[in-house]
Amino acid sequence: MITIKRFYVGLVSSLCLLMPALSMADMAAAEAAYRAKDYPRAFEEFEVSAREGDSLAQHNLAVMYENGIGVEADNGKALEWYEKAAENNQVGSQRNLANMYLNGRGVEVEYAKAVYWFGRAAENGDSASQLRLGNMYHNALGVERDDELAAGWYRKAAEQGDLSAQILLGQMYAKGDGVAKDEIKSAFWYRKAADQGDPSAQHALGVCYALGLGVALNEEEAVRWYLAAAKNGQNESQLNLAYRYMDGRGVPVNLDEAYRWAELSLVNGNKDAAKLVNSLEMRRARAQQPLATPSPKAPQASKAVSVRRKPLHRARSRHARSRTLKKRD
């Protein structure tokens, strides 16, 4: 009896040791099939591991259901497997599950549940969830508005390099929302995002240099950042650049460049650029209009110069004068 019991316990222990190995083999096969684009087989292999409790397999199975990869798309099934993986602390599933509750995919919109799952993922260090949790607090979705908490979550995401969080944190420091107003910190976070190539951050940093907000006023630096943003399609920077070429601020005056950037800003949807475009068109038209040549005048006949001569007075002799006097007497 003791021998049989020992055999049973040993068998169970062996099976417990064998199951993770089998699961790892299934996962390896699933991943190999996925890389080979054999999605139906990958789905089958992931499903085996998912049912055995592997959180990554559960997550991958949910992704395939959500996007219709190797199986017909089914948001309800995706939600089911995301929940299983999320409960097993799979961070990607926690974030995706929150997004499904936020956007109503496979389930009714429930902001409170979205906040809960974004919170779980954010606590696990997921920067995308930290950003979204900040948005939920800032916009009062599923929670009361709390800009201080929003700024705190934005900061955590920003410190991990999340570009959107860096811009939002810069804006909060610029306005004093949830934090003490601090133009230096605002410019700092704008620069972090601008260095990653974000056009809105590049524009904001250009404004900081143009107005001396958190940095020393520097028109050349303003132009540099406006130009970077303008090349990335930022229409406000395109218009600001046009004004600088027109006025000669930070760059030499160049009306052709001013017109080019103003017109591009208008094409890209900035209606404020229309006035400048019209003004520059009028100036260009005047500059290109030839000067009027005066018509030659007919030569005028020379007038005879009349010289007025004074009558000559003859000198009278003393004898004649004396005779005249005698007559008057």
Image (tube, grey):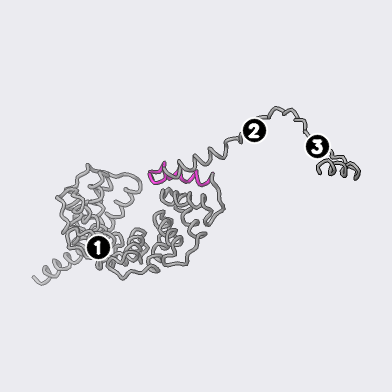
Relative to 327, 144 lies left or right: left
Residue 22 in view in this figure: no
The residue most toward the front is 329
Contact between marks 2 and 3 (CB within 8 A): the answer is: no
Please tell me whether residue 226 is drawn above or below residue 322 in the rendered image.
below
Q: Quadrant of residue 162?
A: bottom left
Is 17 left, or right, of 199 in this rendering? left
Q: Main secondary structure of the magenta part?
A: helix
Label 1 crowd (10 A; few <14 / some 14-19 / many >=20) = many
Q: Which residues are magenta?
A: 256-273
Give the residue pinned by disc 1: 121
Residue 117 locus on image (x, y percent): 20, 60
Q: What's the amino acid at mark 1? A: Ala
Above or below, 115 against 32 in this view is below
Q: Position of residue 103 (x, y in %)?
A: 21, 50
Secondary structure beneath dot 3 equals loop
Task: Find disc 3 in the rendering and name its residue.
Answer: 309
Q: CA distance from mark 3 to mark 1?
A: 117 Å
For label 2, the residue is 294
